[in-house]
Image (cartoon, grey):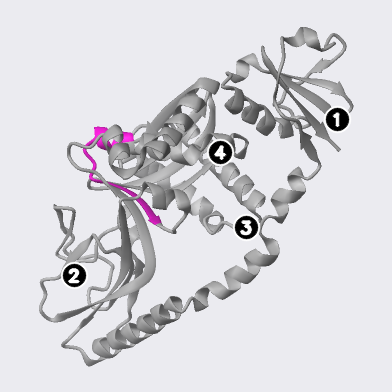
C-alpha cells in the first residue's frame, strides 16, 4: 500500500541522512550537490518534506512525479558568507558601530576576565572527552530551562543523540564547538556540516556567565571559523530569538515540498490529501491558532523559577576601595565557590569581574558575617547578602 514518507528535511539533510532518490540534485548559493543515491529506503513517490529552507532548490527530473511547494509560516535565520568574507568585514556589513562595539566587548571582556580557550572538535575527539562535553551540554540545557521554567524538547531523545553523534564527528558530519574557562566548558554548540554549510543545531551555556553574552561570542567565533574554512553559510535554523535576528543577513521562509506519482491514482489521492492537510495547517498557523496554548502556559509559568532563585539575594553597588586593609578580614573566612554551599556566589563573582574588568584570579570572596559576603579586588568591592 502506498504511504507518504514524512521527513523534517533540514535536520534530515544536515544529519547526513540520504537524500530521497527522487531528488536528482539540489542547489544553494551557487553550490550544487548531485544526489548519488540510486535506491534507498525512502519511498520515492509520496514524500512530505517539511522545513525545506527556501534557499535550497530541489530538482526532480522524473516527469511522472508531481512536485508541490507550499510556503510555511516558519522563518529561518542564517549568515551568508562571500568568498572574501572575514569576521571583521561581516560585522562591518551587518551591524552599526555601536553594536559592533558591544559584540567585541563581549569577546574581549570574556578573554580578559577568564583563561579562555576555543575549541572545535571536528573529526578528532576521544570518546571520554566526547561524553564529558555532551554531559556538560545536557547539564547546561537543564539549568537554563529550569531558570526559564520551560521544557526542552531535545532532552527526551538525548540518549539517541549521544549514541549517534560521536561517529558523525569522527566522519566530519558533525562537530562540537566549546568555549572553555581553563578546563571547564562554559558554552557548547552541537553543529552539523553539509557541503559548505554549518548548522548550529543545539547550544547552551553556563548561566553563571550570562553577563558575558556567550551566545554572541559563540556566533562570533563560529562565523570566524566558517570564514577561515571557506564555508558559505552559518545556519541557525528556525526560531526568531533576538540574537538570531540581529546576526542574520539571510532571513528566509521554510517550504513544505510534497511529491506523488501522476501515474498512480492511489498515490495521487494520498498526495492531494497531504497537500490539503498542509495548506490547512499553514492557514491556521497564519492565524496564530497554534500559539494559544504556549502563550497561556507562558503567562502563568514563565519566570517563576528565576524569581524564586534570586529573590532572597541582595547585592550592593560596586564601590571603590584602597584594598583589603579597609576591612578587618583576619577573622573572615575566604570562600571557595566551587562547593555546594557557595556555588550560588559564582554568578555574582563573575558579574563583578565583568563590571570591573578584572581577572577572576585577582578577586576574592569572604564570609564577613552570617550569610553576608564581601567580593573584593585590588580597588573595588561589593557586598552580597542572603536572607
Label 2 sits on residue:
22
In which quadrant will I find the C terminus?
top right
Q: Residues within 10 Å of mark 4 (few under 14, many from 20)?
A: many
The first of marks 1 and 3 along the sequence is 3
Label 4 sits on residue:
136
Could you tell me which residue is drawn at 51 percent across and 75 percent down?
A: 290
Q: CA–CA distance between discs 4 and 2?
A: 40 Å
Residue 164 image position (x, y, % from top left): 42, 49
Could you tell me if the residues under marks 3 and 2 are in contact, i.e. CB atoms within 8 Å? Answer: no
Which label sits in the foreground, 3 or 4? 3
375 left or right, relative to 2: right
Magenta span of residues: 224-237
Element at label 3: loop
The first of marks 1 and 4 along the sequence is 4
Q: Nearer the viewer, residue 120 or 353?
A: 353
Residue 360 image position (x, y, % from top left): 61, 20
- Residue 351 falls in which quadrant of the image? top right
Label 1 sits on residue:
371
Could you tell me which residue is drawn at 85 percent across and 30 percent down?
A: 371
Q: Nearer the viewer, residue 146 or 155?
A: 146
Could you tell me which residue is drawn at 66 percent across and 49 percent down?
A: 147
Amino acid at each position: 500500500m502506498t504511504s507518504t514518507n514524512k521527513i523534517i528535511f533540514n535536520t534530515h539533510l544536515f544529519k547526513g541522512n540520504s537524500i530521497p532518490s527522487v531528488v536528482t540534485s539540489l542547489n544553494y548559493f551557487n553550490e550544487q550537490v548531485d544526489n548519488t543515491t540510486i535506491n534507498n529506503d525512502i519511498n520515492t513517490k509520496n514524500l512530505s518534506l517539511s522545513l525545506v529552507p527556501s534557499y535550497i532548490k530541489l530538482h526532480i527530473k522524473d516527469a511522472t512525479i508531481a512536485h508541490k511547494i507550499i510556503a510555511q509560516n516558519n522563518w529561518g535565520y542564517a549568515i551568508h558568507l562571500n568568498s572574501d568574507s572575514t569576521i571583521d568585514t561581516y560585522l562591518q556589513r551587518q551591524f552599526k558601530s555601536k553594536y559592533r562595539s558591544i559584540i567585541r566587548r563581549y569577546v574581549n571582556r570574556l578573554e580578559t576576565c577568564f583563561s579562555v580557550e576555543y575549541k572545535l572538535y571536528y573529526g578528532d575527539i576521544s570518546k571520554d572527552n566526547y561524553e564529558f562535553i555532551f554531559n556538560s551540554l545536557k547539564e547546561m540545557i537543564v539549568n537554563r530551562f529550569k531558570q526559564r521554567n520551560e521544557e526542552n524538547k531535545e532532552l527526551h531523545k538525548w540518549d539517541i543523540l549521544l549514541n549517534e553523534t560521536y561517529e558523525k564527528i569522527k566522519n566530519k558530519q558533525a562537530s562540537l564547538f566549546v568555549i572553555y574557562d581553563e578546563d571547564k566548558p562554559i558554552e557548547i554548540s552541537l553543529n552539523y556540516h553539509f557541503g559548505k554549510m554549518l548548522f548550529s543545531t543545539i547550544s547552551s551555556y553556563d548561566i553563571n556567565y550570562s553577563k558575558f553574552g556567550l551566545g554572541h561570542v559563540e556566533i562570533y567565533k563560529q562565523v570566524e571559523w566558517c570564514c577561515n574554512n571557506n564555508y558559505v553559510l552559518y545556519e541557525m535554523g528556525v526560531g526568531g530569538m533576538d540574537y538570531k535576528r540581529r546576526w542574520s543577513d539571510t532571513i528566509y521562509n521554510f517550504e513544505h515540498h510534497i511529491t506523488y506519482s501522476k501515474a498512480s491514482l492511489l498515490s495521487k489521492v494520498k498526495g492531494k490529501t497531504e497537500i490539503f492537510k498542509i495548506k490547512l495547517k499553514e492557514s491556521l498557523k497564519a492565524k496564530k491558532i497554534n500559539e494559544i496554548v504556549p502563550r497561556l502556559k507562558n503567562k502563568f509559568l514563565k519566570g517563576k523559577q528565576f524569581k524564586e532563585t534570586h529573590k532572597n539575594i541582595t547585592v550592593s553597588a560596586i564601590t571603590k576601595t584602597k584594598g583589603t586593609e579597609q576591612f578587618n578580614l583576619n577573622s573572615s573566612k575566604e570562600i571557595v565557590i566551587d562547593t555546594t554551599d557557595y556555588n550560588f556566589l559564582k554568578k555574582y563573582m563573575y558579574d563583578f569581574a565583568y563590571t570591573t574588568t578584572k581577572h577572576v584570579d585577582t578577586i576574592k570572596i569572604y564570609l564577613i558575617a552570617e550569610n553576608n559576603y564581601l567580593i573584593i579586588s585590588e580597588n573595588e568591592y561589593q557586598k552580597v547578602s542572603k536572607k
